[in-house]
Image: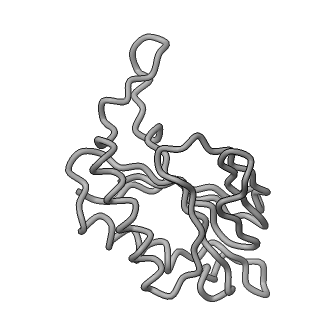
């Protein structure tokens, strides 16, 4: 499992001209799955994101989590996170999980984060989405779950 986390002051996902998810201060998280990902990776990543200290405290240090600042998380499924661009000029997506499996994993991941008390919004799996954000910092992290 791979995520790209961006600290944002606002973010939104639009599908077919309608906003399907939006947040103010918090994290935009692009989420990708690969073969072999399972509930263990979901739990690990949910714990990691809930406690990730990427928000500034009173001294300007990254010491606070999204929970501590009362922020939200916008989750966007993104199979292109597992693109292989090493050969040729056209990306290969053979490392991305099959859509039926990835859909189940994405829904399970959203459920885990919501059950942990985080306020979430999400994109639509398999849809053509337009994502807009105001990156706060900019602060961006790429996190891979352990296998």
On screen, residue 42 versus residue 32, left or right, reads left
In this view, the residue in front, 52 or 110, is: 110
Give coordinates of residue 51: x percent, y percent: 50, 80
Q: Where is residue 129 in the image (x, y as percent from the top left)?
A: 62, 44
Furthest toward the top, the residue is 88
Q: In which quarter of the image is the C terminus?
A: bottom left
Q: Residue visible at 35% across and 49% down?
A: 33
Applied colour scheme: one colour
Q: Where is residue 61 in the image (x, y as percent from the top left)?
A: 71, 77
Q: In this view, does 16 lie above or below 64?
A: above
Q: Quadrant of residue 24?
A: bottom right
Horizontal side of 25 relative to 73 (left or right) equals right
Instruction: From the top left corner, tell me how far across and down residue 38 is, in percent.
Output: 23, 61
Residue at point 72%, 58% (across, down): 19
Q: Is residue 9 positioned above or below 140 on the image?
A: below
Residue displayed at 34% across by 39% down: 96
Looking at the rendering, in which quadrant would you find the N terminus? bottom left
The quadrant holding residue 72 is: bottom right
In front of the other: 128 or 80: 128
């Amino acid at each position: 499992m791979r995520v790209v986390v961006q600290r944002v002051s606002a973010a939104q996902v639009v599908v077919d001209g309608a906003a399907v998810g939006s947040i103010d201060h918090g994290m935009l998280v692009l989420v990708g799955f690969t073969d072999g990902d399972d509930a263990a990776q979901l739990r690990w990543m949910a714990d990691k994101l809930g406690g990730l200290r990427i928000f500034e405290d009173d001294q300007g240090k990254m010491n606070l989590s999204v929970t501590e600042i009362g922020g939200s998380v916008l989750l966007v499924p993104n199979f292109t996170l597992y693109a292989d661009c090493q050969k040729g000029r056209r990306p290969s997506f053979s490392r991305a999980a099959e859509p039926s499996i990835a859909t189940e994993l994405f829904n399970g991941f959203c459920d885990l984060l919501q059950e942990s008390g985080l306020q979430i919004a999400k994109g639509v799996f398999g849809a053509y989405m337009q994502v807009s954000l105001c990156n706060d910092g900019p602060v961006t992290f790429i996190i891979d779950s352990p296998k």
